[in-house]
């Protein structure tokens, strides 16, 4: 099963931080692409649905209002594991 990811809005906010709103499609772990942001740390927050995050070899289910911090350069994957698509907001901050 392939995964759909749709970025609906990306905006740059104060001090160069960027916010991205994404809709994550239902998939299994193998279908979720690996992500790595070499120069940015990420704060991910679930705003609708259930997302599974694979980070540093561990998986964790995140539901509405749950957050996860992802250090720059850390490979990770995420996918919707609920009844339908999930929506997340991510804040990216450039590391110095």
Image (cartoon, rainbow, N blue to C red):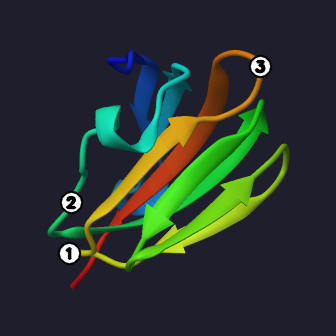
Q: Nearer the viewer, residue 2 or 39?
A: 2
Mark 2 to mark 3 CA distance (whole Å): 27 Å
Q: Nearer the viewer, residue 95 or 45?
A: 45
Residue found at x 21% / y 85%: 96
Indicate the quadrant containing the N terminus: top left, top right, bottom left or bottom right.
top left
Mark 3 to mark 1 CA distance (whole Å): 31 Å
Label 3: few (<14), some (14–19) or many (≥20) C-alpha neighbours in 10 Å: few
Compared with 7, 58 (above or below) is below
Between marks 3 and 1 in the image, the one whose residue lies nearer the viewer:
3
**Contact check, label 1 and label 2, Cβ < 8 Å:** yes
Between marks 2 and 3 in the image, the one whose residue lies nearer the viewer:
3
Residue 95 percent location from the top left of the image: 26, 79
Label 2: few (<14), some (14–19) or many (≥20) C-alpha neighbours in 10 Å: some
Q: Quadrant of residue 3?
A: top left
Residue found at x 64% / y 65%: 60
Element class at badge 2: loop
Q: Quadrant of residue 57?
A: bottom left
Residue 16 left/right relative to 51: left
Q: Label 2 belongs to which residue?
A: 36
Residue found at x 42% / y 32%: 11
Residue 39 left/right relative to 61: left
Q: Label 1 belongs to which residue?
A: 73
Q: Earlier in the sequence, mark 2 or mark 3?
A: 2
Mark 1 to mark 2 CA distance (whole Å): 6 Å
Residue 30 percent location from the top left of the image: 32, 41
């Amino acid at each position: 099963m392939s995964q759909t990811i749709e970025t609906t809005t990306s905006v740059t906010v104060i001090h160069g931080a960027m916010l991205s709103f994404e809709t994550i499609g239902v998939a299994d772990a193998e279908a979720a692409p690996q992500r790595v942001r070499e120069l940015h740390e990420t704060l991910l927050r679930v705003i609708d649905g259930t997302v599974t995050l694979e980070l540093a070899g561990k998986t964790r289910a995140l539901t509405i209002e749950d957050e996860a911090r992802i250090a720059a350069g850390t490979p990770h994957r995420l996918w919707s594991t609920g009844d339908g698509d999930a929506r997340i907001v991510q804040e990216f901050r450039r590391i110095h």
